[in-house]
């Protein structure tokens, strides 16, 4: 995703979702040809010229000030995650050292720290796994591996939770709330891609899923943005039956984008009992991928 065109795409997608009434404009008679707000209306409400805003959407104005971005975020009714995404896109589209600034093309390291690998064992029997910034599965404890049945059949470099969600034949049966999981997965990839628009592994993954999954392509065009720090998944077809688990995501290597995902359930509940059984089943190991 090009950083400049990405900023324009985001602005167009978000203004299409805001009605004139939501923006505080008076109701008018007649049929509007534009879904949501027009460019002119966003410019008026944000206090910038129409030409300035038009150039911003067209990728010809790539150094918007923080004050302008705040004003536009308010007009488009962006939440915290969406606002951060807007600022990330603007930073990516505004090189600070001139035209020769190299793009973000160096892939982050894939080797987990030894201490992080120990954490996977420490949190057991809670299922846990380690993901890269593009959701590659780098390591997992035994119950964590059992949450993704069949992923061990893929080559190590192909093991990716986003790819699993949309392309693995078990995923739709596994997740009782598949539509919710799928939407959250795409929204998270949007957030990461906004912060790293030139990252090759992200570009390749998004391109692959767009071509191979119509559902992914549809969700990608919605332009939802969410930073996934916690959530809930319903495992309807797991190795131990149905269970609902909550999860927390912890950043364990900020420069590399590694995240430790830990699942849990309320003690004394059937979900907790089912979760404990995961650690008693056999599962292939997931060695670190280097």
Image (cartoon, rainbow, N blue to C red):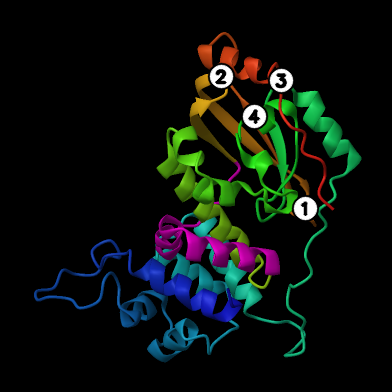
Q: Are marks 2 and 4 in contact (CB under 8 Å)?
A: yes
| Residue 246 placement, left or right of 135 | left
In this rendered view, identify the residue nearer to me: 157 or 27. 157
Quadrant of the image occupied by residue 96:
bottom right
Q: Nearer the viewer, mark 1 or mark 4?
A: 4
Disc 2 target residue: 240
Coordinates of residue 281 in the picture (x, y in percent): 68, 19
Disc 1 target residue: 254
Q: Are marks 4 and 3 in contact (CB under 8 Å)?
A: no
- x 51%, y 33%: residue: 233
- x 12%, y 75%: residue: 31
Q: Which residue range is magenta in the image?
A: 200-229
Q: Secondary structure at mark 2?
A: loop
Disc 3 target residue: 125
Q: Nearer the viewer, mark 4 or mark 3?
A: 4
Q: Secondary structure at mark 1?
A: loop
Query: In the rendering, which numbered label is found on residue 146?
Result: 4
41 versus 196 height, above or below: below
Q: Secondary structure at mark 3?
A: loop
202 versus 180 height, above or below: below
State which tag comes first along the sequence, 2 or 1. 2
Q: Nearer the viewer, mark 3 or mark 2?
A: 2
Q: Nearer the viewer, mark 2 or mark 1?
A: 2
Cα distance, mark 3 to mark 1? 26 Å
State which tag comes first along the sequence, 1 or 4. 4
| Residue 205 placement, left or right of 95 | left
């Amino acid at each position: 995703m090009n950083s400049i065109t990405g900023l324009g795409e985001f602005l167009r997608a978000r203004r299409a979702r805001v009605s004139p009434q939501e923006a505080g404009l008076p109701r008018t008679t007649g049929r509007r040809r534009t879904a949501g707000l027009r460019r002119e209306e966003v410019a008026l409400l944000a206090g910038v010229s129409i030409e300035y805003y038009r150039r911003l959407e067209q990728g010809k104005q790539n150094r918007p000030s923080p004050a302008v971005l705040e004003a536009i975020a308010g007009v488009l009714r962006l939440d915290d995650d969406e606002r951060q995404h807007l600022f990330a896109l603007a930073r990516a589209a505004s090189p600070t050292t001139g035209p020769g600034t190299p793009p973000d093309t160096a892939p982050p390291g894939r080797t987990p720290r030894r201490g992080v690998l120990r954490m996977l064992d420490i949190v057991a029997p809670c299922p846990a796994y380690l993901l890269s910034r593009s959701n590659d599965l780098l390591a997992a404890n035994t119950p964590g591996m059992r949450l993704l049945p069949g992923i061990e059949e893929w080559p190590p470099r192909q093991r990716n939770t986003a790819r699993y969600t949309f392309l693995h034949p078990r995923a739709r049966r596994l997740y009782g709330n598949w539509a919710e999981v799928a939407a959250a997965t795409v929204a998270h990839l949007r957030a990461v891609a906004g912060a790293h628009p030139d990252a090759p592994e992200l570009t390749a993954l998004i391109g692959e899923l767009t071509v191979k999954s119509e559902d992914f392509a549809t969700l990608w065009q919605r332009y939802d943005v969410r930073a996934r720090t916690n959530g809930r998944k319903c495992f309807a077809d797991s190795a131990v039956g149905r269970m609902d688990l909550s999860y927390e995501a912890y950043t364990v290597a900020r420069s590399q984008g590694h995240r430790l995902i830990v699942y849990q359930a309320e003690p004394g509940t059937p979900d907790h009992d089912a979760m404990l059984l995961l650690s008693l089943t056999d599962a292939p190991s997931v060695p670190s991928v280097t």
